[in-house]
Amino acid sequence: MRYLRNSWYVAAWADEVTDGLLARTLLNEPVVLFRDETGKAVALQDRCPHRFVPLSMGRLTEAGLMCGYHGLVFGTGGGCVANPHGPITKALSVRSYPVTERHQQIWLWMGEPAKADPGLIPDFSFLDDATLRPLWGYMRTKAHYELMTDNIMDLGHIEFLHPETLGSEAIRKARTASRQEGNTVYSDRTVHEETLSSFMDYTFETGGRPVTRWLNVRWDPPASMLLTIRVDPAGPELGVRETYGSHIMTPETDNTCHYFWSTVRNFGPDSAELDARKRNALEQAFLSEDKPMIEAQAAAIGTADLLKLEPALLRPDAAAVQARRVLARLINEEA
């Protein structure tokens, strides 16, 4: 499997990496994440060069990360800083990945270190806004990461897969559009005269009134998506309301991926009850509905490329196909 190497990938939420070691595979590469004595996030290859055991089975010391098997210690740059068995040689080193902590997430650059420009990280700055009420989570899926991308780029499925939480019968009547600006692809869906599900009605406080809902997705390669949901009217006293969410996929292996999701709202009370209900509904949708369906899809497709199977395409598939083609072009150009 070929990946876009010169790109930033989310490896973890910042609060997943505290005072211990976190092992995670990205793009078929084992990585161990931890923080140095200043609190800065560090990412090293999770494989000791001596006997190839995971360094994540070791422990942090004042000098660095100690392998739990023979006691070799590695510094934050990947070089060996202590060898209790003899001299330090060039062979005693592991790969160190460029790391940037931004938008409450730890991003790794998987390609050439000299090209690691933090300015290339997509904008998810809503996660840094203290006035918004954030929820975020993580899900591992046994599916190729582009299948998970397709799921967000075409939200026509929410009427059928998420009828009790995110969808409604009006979704099929939506006006859809897609566009491309540079390497960014947009998928826009507008639904008029929609009666929201009880969960969405509760979330947006629409009181059962018919609304216009916009579902707008911004995709940046390789698989970072911003979903903006706008609802109008939520009553004359409330006006238009918005939620913003990130849906970021990072390949784990050729057939598995990491899914980092978040959502914030710019309205409503600072309510633990509302946040808990929203989290429960989203986790039901992601874990109990999206995940089984996409994993079954992945099992049916196997190792084949989706587009090479010549699927019967529907009108709302345009944005997902555009994103796939942009990514394929970038991978080919890099190669």
Image: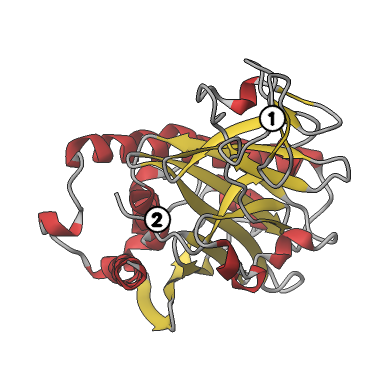
Q: Look at the picture and state if 118 lies above or below 110.
A: below
Quadrant of the rendered structure where residue 2 is? Answer: bottom left
319 and 52: which one is in front?
52
Local secondary structure at mark 2: helix
At horizontal 25% and vertical 40% (from top left) the residue drawn is 297
Residue 29 in the image: state x and y as whole percent: 46, 40
Locate residue 207, reporting x and y percent: 64, 56
Q: Is residue 175 visible?
A: yes
Q: Nearer the viewer, residue 216 or 163?
A: 216
Pick whichever of labels 2 and 1 is earlier in the sequence.
Answer: 1
Q: Are marks 2 and 1 in contact (CB under 8 Å)?
A: no
Give the labeled residue for mark 1: 87
197 left or right, relative to 273: left
Q: Which mark is residue 149?
A: 2
Task: Find numbered disc 1 in the image and state the secondary structure of the residue it sits on.
Answer: loop
Task: Residue 222: give x, y in percent of width and height.
Answer: 44, 62
Query: Looking at the picture, which amino acid does disc 2 mark?
Result: Thr
Q: Quadrant of the C terminus?
A: bottom left
